[in-house]
Image (tube, rainbow, N blue to C red):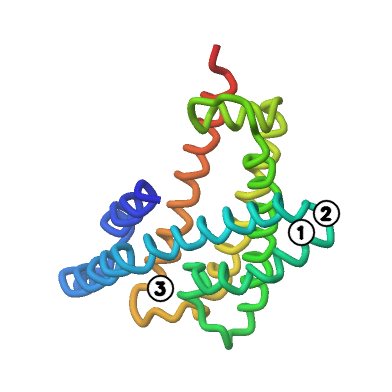
Amino acid sequence: MEDSITLGRKLIETELDAGVLNFIIKPIIKTFYDLWARQDARSNTLKQIKISLDAGLDMLKDGASDENFNRIAEENFPKYLEADQTSIMANHEHKNYSRLKNLTKETFINYLKEIIKLLNVEDDVENYGDLCRVVFQLKELAEENLMKQLSFTEEAIKIIEEDPSILKVLVGKKTLVKVLRRGFEITKAEFIKGLNDTYDKK
């Protein structure tokens, strides 16, 4: 989370070009980003993590049957959506908002499926890499899961790129869209490198 926030600010610096108005526009967008990152992004990301973990624990306690899974997912999704940064930044009356909302739900459901696997681990593990190697014993399985999760994020970015008017921000929409795309590509490459390092480790 912290790395993503830092990357976002760096990308605003490198991607923003407002021409002769740069000296006026750039400080406005950077100030907006810093306020958003310090207040909303951190707290809401932590809320989403807690909601997901609590829902996963409830599923383990009640039994991860399809019926319980669907019930707990439906009960917790509204809270997860309320803390979702893309949903917060989007105009809910926009024609494409339902598509974003559906992608957020697919993301949440996929998270829950993987969280249950992670919470079920009883092996003595030292770090997240060890935990992943226990859950996804084959690198191919971990890669398949990672790419599935990334596909949801990429689809959401495509919806915003298709029509940036879905964003509620008043200035810098084009810059924010460029930052989203560039940030995603960098993060995706880092995730893939991390996965390779984790599974190719001798």
Cβ atoms at labels 3 and 1 below 8 Å apart: no
Pointer 3 or 2: first along the chain? 2
Cβ atoms at labels 1 and 2 below 8 Å apart: yes
Secondary structure of residue under mark 2: loop
Q: Residue furthest left?
A: 23
What residue is disc 2 on?
Answer: 65
Q: Amino acid at mark 1?
A: Phe
Count every numbered label the image shows and give the total: 3
Q: Amino acid at mark 2?
A: Ser
x and y percentages locating residue 132 in the rendered image: 60, 32
In this view, the residue in front, 171 or 4, is 4
Which of the 4 image quadrants contains residue 68? bottom right
Secondary structure of residue under mark 1: helix
- Of badges 3 and 2, nearer the viewer stands 2
Secondary structure of residue under mark 3: helix
- Of badges 3 and 1, nearer the viewer stands 1
Which of the 4 image quadrants contains residue 158? bottom right
Q: Residue at x 63, y 40 (%)?
A: 118
What residue is disc 3 on?
Answer: 173
x and y percentages locating residue 69 in the rendered image: 76, 59
In this view, the residue in front, 114 or 172, is 114
Q: CA distance from mark 1 to mark 2?
A: 6 Å
What residue is disc 1 on?
Answer: 69
x and y percentages locating residue 100 in the rendered image: 62, 71
Q: CA distance from mark 3 to mark 1?
A: 38 Å
Q: Residue at x 68, y 31 (%)?
A: 136
